[in-house]
Image (cartoon, rainbow, N blue to C red):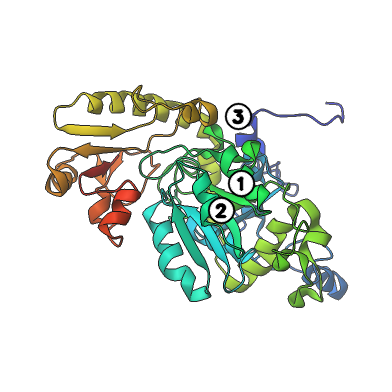
Amino acid sequence: MSGEQREFGFETLCVHAGAQPDPVTGARAVPIYQTTSYVFESADHAAALFNLQQFGYIYSRLTNPTVAVLEERVAALEGGTGACATASGHAAQVIAFFNLLTPGDHVVASNKLYGGSINQMKVSYPQFDWHVTFVDPRNPDNFREAATERTKAFFIESVSNPDAIVADIEAIAGIAHELGIPLIVDNTIATPYLCRPFEWGADIVVHSLIKYMGGQGNSIGGAVVESGNFDWFQNDKFPLMTEPCAAYHGLRFAETFGNFAFTVRCKAMGLRDLGPCMSPFNAFLILQGIETLPLRMERIVQNADRVADFLASHPYVAWVSYPRLPENRTPLVDKYCPRGVGGVFTFGVKGGYEMGVKVVDHCELISHVANIGDTRTLIIHPASTTHRQLTPEQQKAAGAGPEVVRL
Ligand SMILES: *Cc1c(COP(=O)(O)O)cnc(C)c1O
């Protein structure tokens, strides 16, 4: 092939991005570099690595060659400039906010979030003196109204867990940019195969990679991805990105690393000091899953369409919240997720809480677990499990009322 820059399609990137045959052994699959540390060439080389003057491997809490392939692949699939893999999706959220928030800062988040994310932000973030206001994402103006002087980001899910509501990413990003702050989108359910938030103005994407990306329910992991488009110097809201960093001799991340500064800080500060790195073995398994992402998502959408149709006409089902049903379909669904919204959705059973619990107790092939995006079909009754810590009002707002079952 000639040396010209080639553009590869999404399917090809799923298999190849970030990887090449191992230069030493020729190994074709991505090797698992199960090592904590890497031998320095010399004292000078070590010093340059520690100063972030040269990129290379120091210690696997910061970077690891197997994890690096996964990071490059996820960044390529999202169309971003860089990614930082983390121990879990929750770790990805903390690491992303750790680049943005100082004590007293504020975030406006969708109230249609995974229950664990609502708990994390509502109960644990105040320990850091970080504060989150939750708003209904179906009206983008709610984000503007809830913003304060100290608001440093908006946070939404592209397709919400559990009730598959599609957010108006472009409108919410537009309001964020008017205020000079980034929009963070959790793209776990849609995956970049079905929705690419950066194309609609999002600045940061976070993932729980154990769901559809890995797709086989075998390894916890997450990622933070950056678009490379956000100008950290446009105002004085982001000192962690723009001011001299004492941990690196006064280096300014945004100045030194430009359009991948957010990613570098995720690793150099977030992973280094908080510690939630991904294991190389998990990175390997998630990479195996990503190789088949397009095929799986296509089939998952086909299956979900049929199951949602079946449930919608079932006499014991009160309603189905699946955006591809004709009665639920909005222009937002066709705009952001024309090929599907994944296979996670909710339905309401007639008979409330008791009937909801009964349904999950009587499934045989379908497993009652707190996960989604497995090869196996999974079911849960959110009000008695994932969303149990929330008040009845919050449960309802999050689409997890007493009669709700998530499939
Ligand atoms: C599961 C999930 C998370 C949390 O990810 P973990 O990997 O479980 O920490 C965040 N967001 C969404 C939408 C999820 O489904």
Viewer-side label of 1, 3: 1
Pointer 3 local density, CA inside 10 Å: few below 14, some 14–19, many at least 20: some
Q: Which residue is mark 1?
A: 175
Crowd rating for badge 1 (residues with CA inside 10 Å; few <14, some 14–19, many 20+): some
Disc 1 residue type (three-letter): Ile
Residue 226: where, in percent of width, then height? 66, 50
Please identify, in this view, whether the residue under mark 3 or under mark 2 is nearer the observer.
2
Q: Looking at the rendering, in which quadrant would you find the C terminus? A: top left
Disc 3 within 8 angstroms of ligand 1 (CB): no
Q: Amino acid at mark 2?
A: Phe
SS at mark 2?
A: strand
- Residue lying at 74% horizontally and 57% vertically, measured from the top left: 232
The residues bearing labels 3 and 2 have C-alpha atoms spaced at a distance of: 31 Å
- Rendered view: 325 above or below 44: above
Asked whether the residues under the numbered discs 2 and 1 touch, taking CB atoms below 8 Å apart as contact, a structural biologist would say yes
Name the foreground residue: 165 vs 289: 165
Q: Which residue is mark 3?
A: 11
Instruction: List the residue tagged with mark 2.
Output: 154
318 sits left or right of 110 in the view: left
User: Which secondary structure, mark 1?
Assistant: helix
Quadrant in the picture for residue 308: top left
Picture coordinates of residue 18 (x, y %)? Answer: 68, 43
- Label 2 packing within 10 angstroms: few (<14), some (14-19), many (20+): many
- Name the residue nearer the viewer: 12 or 262: 262
Write the residue at 86% across / 29% down. Answer: 4
Q: Earlier in the sequence, mark 1 or mark 3?
A: 3
